[in-house]
Each structure stands twice: as C-alpha cells, then as structure tokens.
Amino acid sequence: QSALTQPASVSGSPGQSITISCTGTTSDVGVSKYVSWYQQHSGKAPKLMIYGVSKRPSGVSIRFSGSKSGNTASLTISGLQAEDEGDYYCSSRTTSHTWVFGGGTKLTVL
Amino acid sequence: QVQLQESGPGLVKPSETLSLTCTVSGDPINNYYWNWIRQPAGGGLEWIGRMFTSGSPESSPSLKSRVTISVDTSKNLFSLILSSVTAADTGVYYCARGLRENDDYDWGSDYWGQGTLVTVSS
C-alpha cells in the first residue's frame, strides 16, 4: 500500500480558510468511511481532529471540518488562528483492513 | 482520563529485535483496537499494525514479516516486537487506542502515548 498524497505545505493568514487535500485510491479513501485527520505540533503526539470523514471528536473546534469526494478527502480549517499552525496528516483504512497515512502537510499561519 | 505510556530500550543494535510495551491506565484494555505507529525524525507517520483485544493482529504489508503485536489484558498493556531492525527503523514509536463508537471499533486513534525514541545503531 502506498502513502496517501497530501501537499507538502499550505499557508494562510489569520481569519482565512484553508483546505488540505488527501488523495488515495479505490482501495482506501475512495471506498472507506474510515478517513481521519490528525494535527501534530512539534515534538508532540498527534491529535485526532476528524474521524469518519467528517465527524469531530468532543472538544475539537467547529472551525475544523472534513469531507470526501471520490478518492480525495479534504480538511478545511476556517477562521485560521495562530494555534492551528503545525503538521496535518490524513489516514484511511484500506480494503485489506490495514491503515495508511498521508505524507503530511505543514500548515503555516502567516 | 485514559493514558498510554510507551516503554522500552532507546537503543537497539542492527539485526537485533526491538521490543516495546504500551501500558494503558484509566480504562480497561478490553474491546478496543490497539495500534502502533512510528515516525522517523523529520518524517511522516507510518502505521505499523494493531490488534483487537480478542482478535488477531494486523500489520502493514511492508512490515508484516517482522512485526508481532500482542495484548495482555491481565496487565492492561500491549506490546510490539520488530525483528531484524536496521537504521531505517529509527524513529519515534507511538502507541494509540482505536476510537470506538456505535459498536464500531475502528474510527481512527483517539488516545496516544507521548512516543518513545528508538535508535538503531551499533
């Protein structure tokens, strides 16, 4: 299984919205309801931000939303804040019941 | 509050076996998926494998031949064994719990350990 494809970096100014894409195949993202997104700050463990394509765990800001179209999932962050800066990873369960991560996207808040 | 803590040697020699343990506190280990994920320095996350407390382990196809995962419900911990390690296995190793919701146990990982750095070097 190959890693899911994410852009290496995205940036935005405070208050703006950004979207991070995550492209997989018909063996993972395209057929899976088990798509999740993680935020990771430097030196810290990842934090679950979105699961089940578009569900938010308790305590995660409503500024974070997820969606999927075909083989591509997307994470949108609205009302960008300085604290949103960090690395973001998508993940999907595969048809083999294993999991695969994306390569990660570095978000810079300008 | 659920907490996970990885433990194990920080240095392993090439060709030897890496063994890590994840101790779970704050909730019984039963009826969850338990995952191992790693991250090389400056790199991305890589899913190693997982095991349901009453099921069979599953692992990444690229690591399958070298990975053993087990769960000890009596001690509330689970373990990872990675054999024949090389420098490419150097990185931070995380343990994580699978999110359970509506009788579905595999929504992603909601609780993570802080990670433990493993270096493969002679």
Image (cartoon, grey):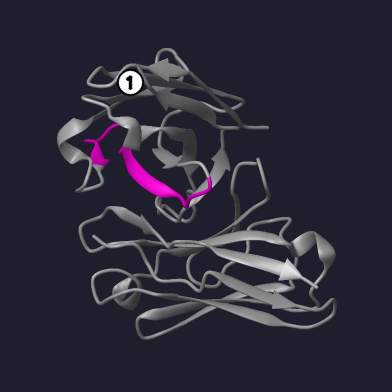
Residue at the farthest left position: B65
Q: Which residues are magenta?
A: B42-58
Residue that mark 1 sits on: B18
Vertical arrangement, residue A2 with respect to residue B33, above or below: below
Task: Decide if residue B65 is on the left or right side of residue A80.
Answer: left
Q: Quadrant of the N terminus of chain A?
A: bottom left
Give residue B92's position: percent from left, percent from top.
49, 34
User: Foreground residue, B36 or B56?
Assistant: B36
Q: Residue at x 34, y 73 (%)?
A: A24
Q: Which chain contains the residue that carries disc 1?
A: B
Q: Within 10 Å of the Cα at label 1, are there few (<14), some (14-19), or many (20+) other Cα atoms? A: many
Q: Quadrant of the C terminus of chain A?
A: bottom right
Q: Residue at x 45, y 14 (%)?
A: B9
Q: Secondary structure at mark 1?
A: strand
Q: Looking at the rendering, which quadrant does residue A12 occupy?
A: bottom right
Give residue A70's position: percent from left, percent from top.
36, 86
User: Foreground residue, A90 or B72?
Assistant: A90
Vertical arrangement, residue A49 with respect to residue B57, above or below: below
Q: How many marks?
A: 1
Q: Looking at the rendering, which quadrant does residue A38 occupy?
A: bottom right
Give residue B118's position: percent from left, percent from top.
45, 25
Residue type of the residue flagged with mark 1? Leu
User: Foreground residue, B100 or A37?
Assistant: A37
Vertical arrangement, residue B105 with respect to residue A16, above or below: above
Task: Decide if residue B46 is on the left or right side of residue B14.
Answer: right
Q: Residue at x 62, y 26 (%)?
A: B26
